[in-house]
Amino acid sequence: MSQKKDPEPGGERGRLPHLLRIDELARSLGVSERHLRRLVQERRIPSLKVGHFVFFDESEIASWLEHCRRPAESSRRTA
């Protein structure tokens, strides 16, 4: 008889993502909830839908923000 071992409580398989509500993410990013809902509808931002509720995985949003980052252009001008 083999017994299956339960995943450890702190293990990767047992860990649930930290989810943000739309109002929390909007406040954090400094944008309106309406803007976030448009990004969700256009599938331009990673999100999770449960029924009519929309949630955002904090780690996925962090990766998405890194991917969207644009380096600053050099302010040097050639004469």
Image: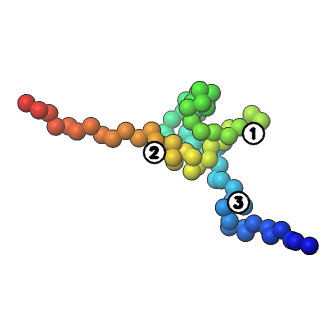
Mark 2: which secondary structure?
helix
Q: Quadrant of the N terminus?
A: bottom right
- Rendered location of residue 3, percent (x, y): 86, 71
Q: CA distance from mark 2 to mark 3?
A: 25 Å
Disc on the earlier residue, 2 or 1: 1
Q: Residues within 10 Å of mark 2 (few under 14, many from 20)?
A: few
Circle nearer the viewer, 2 or 3: 3
Disc on the earlier residue, 1 or 3: 3
| Residue picked out by circle 1 | 50
Taking the image as shown, residue 53 lies to the left or right of residue 18, namely right
Q: Residue at x 60, y 30 (%)?
A: 43
Instruction: Give yes or no for contact between labels 2 and 3 (Cβ–Cβ under 8 Å).
Output: no
Kind of residue at disc 3: Arg
| Residue picked out by circle 2 | 66
- Farthest residue to the left: give it: 79
- Rendered location of residue 6, percent (x, y): 79, 67
Is the residue 17 above or below the residue 2 in the image? Answer: above
Q: CA distance from mark 1 to mark 3?
A: 21 Å
Taking the image as shown, residue 49 lies to the left or right of residue 62, namely right
Q: Residues within 10 Å of mark 3 (few under 14, many from 20)?
A: few
- Rendered location of residue 8, percent (x, y): 73, 69
Q: CA distance from mark 2 to mark 1?
A: 26 Å
Q: Residue at x 51, y 46 (%)?
A: 63
Q: How is the image coloured?
A: rainbow
Taking the image as shown, residue 65 lies to the left or right of residue 72, namely right
Kind of residue at disc 1: Val
Front one among 41 and 2:
2
Front one among 60 and 23:
60
Kind of residue at disc 2: Glu
Q: Residue 44 lies in what quarter of the image? A: top right
| Residue picked out by circle 3 | 13
